[in-house]
Each structure stands twice: as C-alpha cells, then as structure tokens.
Amino acid sequence: MMLAGKTPAPPDPMISVTSLGNHRRVMWRHMERYEEAARSMKSEGYSLVAVEIAGDAQSYVEFEYPKKTCLVLGNEQNGVYPKVLRLCDAAVVIPMAGKGRSLNVHVAAAVVAFQALYGQGGLQDSQS
C-alpha cells in the first residue's frame, strides 16, 4: 500500500482505531508527493487505474484489470488530482443511480478492489 501527501499513516492514533489492528498486517510506505508515489508504482511495473469520475472512465465491472494493478484513490473532496490522473493508465467509475455522484473513498476502494480480484476476468485466475 502506498500512502501519499496528507494521508494519515501509522503511528497516527486514528489508524489503529479504524483498522482494528489490521494496519499491522499490511505493508505500506509513505511518500510526500502524490506524483512521486505514482511514478514509483509505475517504475515497479504497476498499471495505475484511477477510481474516478473521468471522461474516459470505464465501468469498473467491464474493465480488464492488468495483472499488476495499483488502484489510485483521491480524497473525498477533490478526487484524484489532475497531475496524478495524467499519470494513470486508465480510469474506472462506479455507475450511480439517483442524485449522488460518488461514494466514500473506502467504500469505492472496497467495491473496485473486490471486482479487480474476484470479478469476471479478475486477478484470481492469474494467482492460481
């Protein structure tokens, strides 16, 4: 897991409260600049897939996730910053009904990560 910018990171006391201790089981690192984090993941061979309402975004259930996918999540106010979005290889969107345009970041992350790992054409086939 890559954390960047103002994203809280351990040992922030709220991390242990919200993660119920699971933060100790996930490898993570933090970089100060968002673009630096994105470039680092790309240099490690990851395809960056933004979870964002963007003009060229595909439905998250129809997208074919690359074997090494890094989901890029923005903040709940501004989404993925334009400089980072330009570094992404693709964008996916969760279609919404009604007046709401977005979900909480953690909910969107869970929905898309589940699809990337276990959905049709997901990564589970490549891990067996």
Image (tube, rainbow, N blue to C red):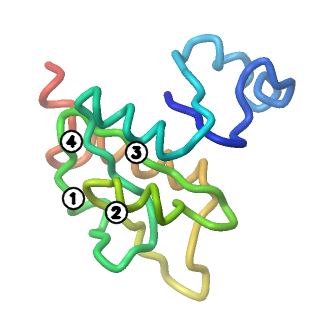
Kind of residue at disc 4: Gly
Q: CA distance from mark 1 to mark 4?
A: 9 Å
Kind of residue at disc 2: Val
N-terminal of the two: label 1 or label 2?
A: 1
Above-or-below relation of 99 to 71: below
Residue at 27 percent of width and 59 percent of height: 90
Asked whether the beta carbons under mark 1 and mark 2 sit within 8 Å of each other, the answer is: yes
Res. 38 mark: none
Q: CA distance from mark 1 to mark 3?
A: 13 Å
Q: Is residue 18 left or right of residue 64?
A: right
Asked whether the beta carbons under mark 2 and mark 4 sit within 8 Å of each other, the answer is: no
Kind of residue at disc 3: Leu
- Name the residue carrying label 3: 71
Q: Secondary structure at mark 3?
A: strand
Asked whether the beta carbons under mark 1 and mark 4 sit within 8 Å of each other, the answer is: no
N-terminal of the two: label 4 or label 3?
A: 3
Q: Position of residue 99 (x, y in %)?
A: 60, 88
Above-or-below relation of 15 to 50: above
- Name the residue carrying label 2: 92
Q: CA distance from mark 2 to mark 3?
A: 9 Å
Residue at 14 percent of width and 19 percent of height: 128
- In this view, the residue farthest toward the right is 13
Res. 63 mark: 1
Q: Residues within 10 Å of mark 1 (few under 14, many from 20)?
A: many
Q: Secondary structure at mark 1?
A: loop
Above-or-below relation of 42 to 88: above
